[in-house]
């Protein structure tokens, strides 16, 4: 598979990981759009929300819970934004479901 996130998860490509467990990895985005810009990436490869089923939906729920629990230790105690881009026209550049975590500053809507 030629997925950059799968290669990061597999250790083939280095990343600045801030968290990892058996289901999920969180690492710094290489093109940050905020003072803090992290990516939460499930280790299971699936491109979009349209492919959520029972267990994948539960995985996404656990991922959101983990982000909430980790927020203070990630410097996000004053708030953060979560973004999930779906498809090229929405800005999804890697076809592996991932959640952008943005914060560390006041975020606008530009």
Image: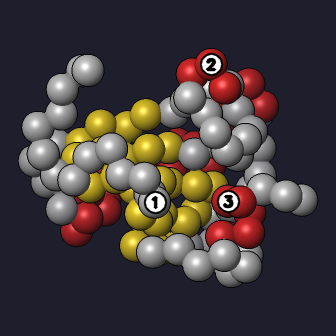
Judged from the image, the secondary structure of the residue bearing numbered disc 1 is loop
Check the picture and name the quadrant holding the N terminus.
bottom right
Q: Secondary structure at mark 2?
A: helix
| Quarter of the figure that contains the C terminus | top left
Q: Which label sits on residue 5? A: 3
- How far across and down, in percent of the image, does residue 100 sit? 44, 44
Question: Mark 1 sits on what residue?
Answer: 30
List the single residue furthest toward the front: 31
Q: Residue at x 73, y 69 (%)?
A: 7
* Residue at 65 percent of width and 70 percent of height: 8
Q: Which mark is residue 89?
A: 2
- Secondary structure at badge 3 equals helix
Whether residue 31 appears in this view of the structure is yes
**Residue 65 visible in the current orientation:** no
**Is residue 28 depicted above or below 102 in this figure?**
below
Q: Nearer the viewer, mark 1 or mark 3?
A: 1
């Amino acid at each position: 598979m030629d997925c950059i996130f799968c290669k990061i998860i597999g250790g083939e490509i280095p990343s600045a990981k801030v968290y990892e467990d058996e289901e999920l990895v969180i690492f710094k985005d290489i093109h940050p759009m905020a003072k803090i810009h992290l990516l939460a990436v499930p280790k299971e490869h699936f491109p979009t929300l349209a492919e959520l089923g029972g267990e994948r939906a539960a995985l996404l729920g656990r991922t959101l819970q983990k982000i909430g629990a980790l927020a203070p230790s990630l410097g996000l105690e004053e708030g953060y934004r979560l973004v999930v881009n779906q498809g090229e026209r929405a800005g999804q550049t890697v076809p592996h479901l991932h959640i952008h975590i943005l914060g560390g500053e006041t975020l606008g809507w530009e």
